[in-house]
Amino acid sequence: MARYQRNPQTAGRIIDGQAFVVTPDDNKLHTLNGAATLLWTLAASGASVDDAAAALCREYEIDDATARTDAAACLDDLVARQILVVAS
């Protein structure tokens, strides 16, 4: 099962519950929404889709199927934007 981690080349901070992440390749500042901030925080120690879905269920009180779909989509988006990487 794939595990997701923060891209070590990025710099990020959480301010008032919202993550702001700079990606160095394109020098962009990314402002993450609440769910993405939660998953970015979780990825600090490595997280799977299951871990991410469980966190979304706890935080937003949604069903498991919705949480898994949303977690997978969010993680894929964060990888595409080079905010997270898939751990080998």
Image (spheres, rainbow, N blue to C red):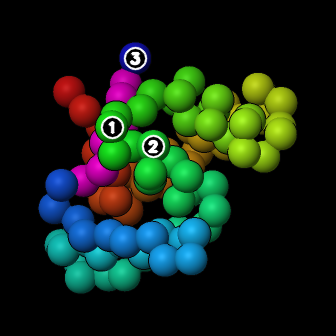
Residue ranking furthest to the top: 1
* Eye-nearest disc, 3 or 1: 1
Provide the residue span drawn in magenta.
Answer: 2-7
Taking the spot 39% from the left edge, 43% from the top edge, the residue there is 43
Taking the spot 16% from the left edge, 61% from the top edge, the residue there is 9
Measured Cα–Cα span from mark 2 to mark 1: 6 Å
Taking the spot 42% from the left edge, 33% from the top edge, the residue there is 47
Label 1: which residue? 45
In which image quadrant can residue 14 be found?
Answer: bottom left
User: Three-letter amino acid code at disc 3?
Assistant: Met
User: In the image, is residue 45 part of the stretch drawn in magenta?
Assistant: no
> Mark 3 or mark 2, which has the lower sequence index?
3
Residue 77, labelled with which disc? none
User: Three-letter amino acid code at disc 2?
Assistant: Leu
Label 3: which residue? 1
Asked whether the beta carbons under mark 2 and mark 1 sit within 8 Å of each other, the answer is: yes
* Eye-nearest disc, 3 or 2: 2
